[in-house]
Structure formats: structure tokens, C-alpha cells
Amino acid sequence: MKKLLHTPEGVRDIINVQCGRKQALQNRILKAFHQYGYHDIQTPVFEYFDVFRKEIGTVPSKDLYKLFDKEGNTLVLRPDITPSVARAAATLFGDEKLPVRLCYTGNTFINHSSYQGRLREVTQMGAELIGDDTAEADAEMLALVIEALLSVGLKEFQLSVGNVDYFSSLIEDAQLDDEARERVTHLINNRNYFGVDDYLDKVKVRRSSREAFASLNGLVGGPEVLREAKENAPDSSGVMAVKRLERIYDVLKLYGLEEYITFDLSMTGGTYGYYTGIIFRGYTFGTGDAIVKGGRYDRLLEKFGKESPSIGFAIVVDELMNAMSRQKIHGFYTRKNTMIIYDDGKTKEAVSLARDLRHKAKNVELLKKDKKRILEEYIEYGKRYYAGNLIYIRESGEITMINLVSGEHKVINGSGDEV
């Protein structure tokens, strides 16, 4: 049998320092979630196909990883965690009348039709606020995203915020059928406004509607674009969608985080068909995709038997790490291990010292020194794997501590008090 030395396309191994940085980043984000009162939930990696069926509006069936159980039921690896949390919430909190706050960390799987270097397995961290339909809830989610990103050291980023109800009001006013809506949505998502106007002209849409779609290209910016959006709204539903954004912005100013917000009235919801109101994406330099995806999904839980307005988001951890690496943000990962190297015959002393340090909450790595290797090899080894200190117990009984950052050497006593 041929040895398999490589992973499949779109997945990867994450080891050592990189893995440590990822875990440290996730811990900081999780702390931000907990500080806002969110409770942890874990959902299965695979679910029944119906949880992600087309009507729910997640990713196309052809992009799902499918498998079968012994009864012949079709299962899929989750491409998105929000529908899984919605299913769980509808089941486990079916009788709850007050809001439920849930947060999660998990991997998602999408079999991208055209690979183009994109990961097929990514880690997402998200939060879902279930049972609250207020603008205050919308503002809280935006504030939580911003606080989470700030907590990991990211400073230069923006949340693009829109409202799918505004886009829907233009679609209704133009009287577009499902096929036309899909075509226009695709063109707008690609910022092809010339294509939009050309297409609408071909399907005989009146000039006022065509002009309303064309105006979307300019409805990107600060709160001033909301005034223009209201003037261009074709009906009361479009006006109400903009007023909702104004109210959210007013609440967000109370958090003191409004500088991270940009409004974009052209946002359509993309492939996620379950969005019903506010929608947002987070962007920073150093990555070509959004690092945050979120929005309101007031009718998603109905698919699983519970009527409950909800809003949530997911932080794409892998995209965030790529961006932070390019921005050279590594400060929150620190050297952790203490390495104890010991000569032959000093096992008792080494194990005793290691136990003592571990009882003091230190991370300790034990290595018996090979007589054929010099100490400098172990020092370089420790530096490669981000150890902080190296303790060498010599055959003579002398114990030396080497700071692997500064290079300082000192003789210590057997308790390791100075480590």
C-alpha cells in the first residue's frame, strides 16, 4: 500500500507554535463571549441533510460533504454552525420565553467546487442571541464582534452593516421573480452595476427601479448614507429597514464603538438565504475574505419547530489568523514550557523537580540528555519550540537554569523557586 504523506486538498495540519497561537486566540475570543453573558454549546460535526437543505438557505448541495448511516439516511458534515445551533435551541429551549445566549467553537466543511487555494475545513467561533428582536440586540452583537476582535490585538478593521430588507424592498418594487432576483443578487454581489442595469433593461423593469438599484453603489459609508437611502427607498418597508439601522447606530454609540462601523445598503445576504434583517461582514487587510459573517435570522428556528427571532455571527478563525500574521500581530502568545534536561543517574531529581513545578502550575518538559549530544543542541531545540527556560541537572548534582530568551545562565537550588 502506498504511504499517504499528504493531507487532502483544502485541509492542513496545525502544529507547535502555530497551534498554540490559534488556541490562545480562541481563548481570548471565548473570554469576550463569556463577558457578554454567552453560554457554551457544542453541536455534532455531522447532521441530517435536512438541517442544511436548500429551503434553509446555507450552501449548495453540491458543495456538501455527504455520507450515509446504517439506515441509509443522508448525513452531511456541517458547512455552517448556525443552523445546527438553531436546531438545538428549538429542541432544548423550546419552552423558553426569554432570550437565550449561546456561543460555540467548531470546524465547518465545504467542498468548494473550484478550489482556488481555499480551505475546505475552517474553524469558526460564533455567538447566537435567540429570542430577542430588538435593535438593542442587534447593537449588542455588533459590539460583541468588535470587542472580540479588539481582544486579540486587531486594530484596523471595519464591519460593513446592511439590511436585507432594504434590498428586498427594491426587488419587490421591481416585481422581479425568483430567477431575476437570483441574477440581480449575483451581479450586485460582484459590484457589477452596469450588468444590473443592462439586465433590468432587458427584462423591462421601469426606469425608477433601475435607478434605485444603481444608487446602491453609492450607499456605502457613514451614517450620512442612511439619509440618502431613506430618500431612495421605494416603499415603507425600505424606509423601516433604514430606520432600524439608524436605531442600531444610536445604541452602538453608547458602547463607544461606532468608529468600526460602515454602512452598505447593497448587502444582499449572499448564499445565506436565512437572513431576514440586519446583515454584517467584518473585513481587515491581509486576507481576501470576510473574517466575520453575521446577521438576523428571525424565521430560521421555525424550520425546527420554534418561533423565535434570532441574530448571530461567526468569526472565521483561520482567516483572522492569516490577517493577523500579515499584520505581524503575535503579542498575546507567550513561551510556556520549562525544559528539564538531566544527566544519566539524575532521573529521581528531575522527576521531583518537574512534579514540584507542575504543582505550581508550570508546564514542564522532561528530557534525558543523550551523552552524544551537547547542551547547545537542547538549547536550540527549546528555542525552536518556544520554551521559556531550560534547567540542566548535571551528573555532579549542580542545577543550572538558562533563560532561552535572554541567554542568561544561573545556578539554582533544587526547588526551582526562581523558575
Image (cartoon, rainbow, N blue to C red):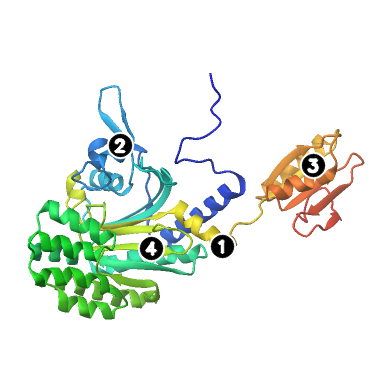
- Amino acid type indicated by mark 3: Ile
Residue holding disc 4:
282
Q: Quadrant of the C terminus?
A: bottom right
Tell which of 184 and 381 is nearer to you: 184
Residue 47: mark in rendering = 2
Mark 1: few, some, or many residues within 10 Å (few <14, many ≥20)? some
Tell which of 276 and 172 is nearer to you: 172
Q: Could you give the CA–CA distance between mark 3 and mark 1, rounded to whole angstroms?
A: 32 Å
Q: Are marks 3 and 1 in contact (CB under 8 Å)?
A: no
Mark 2: few, some, or many residues within 10 Å (few <14, many ≥20)? some
Mark 4: few, some, or many residues within 10 Å (few <14, many ≥20)? many
- Amino acid type indicated by mark 2: Glu
Q: Are marks 4 and 1 in contact (CB under 8 Å)?
A: no
Residue 329: mark in rendering = 1
* Sequence-wise first label, 1 or 2: 2
- Amino acid type indicated by mark 1: Ile
| 137 in relation to 102, above or below | below
Tell which of 42 and 212 is nearer to you: 212
Q: Could you give the CA–CA distance between mark 3 and mark 2, rounded to whole angstroms?
A: 48 Å
Task: Measuring from the top left, give residue 108's x and y in whole percent.
Answer: 38, 44
Q: Could you give the CA–CA distance between mark 1 and mark 2, rounded to whole angstroms?
A: 36 Å
* Sequence-wise first label, 2 or 4: 2
Q: Secondary structure at mark 1?
A: loop
* Sequence-wise first label, 3 or 1: 1
- Amino acid type indicated by mark 4: Gly
Q: Secondary structure at mark 2?
A: strand
* Discs 2/4, front: 4
**22 relative to 374 in the view: left or right:** left
Q: Secondary structure at mark 4?
A: strand
Residue visible at 50% across and 41% down in the picture: 12
* Discs 3/4, front: 4
Q: Are marks 1 and 2 in contact (CB under 8 Å)?
A: no
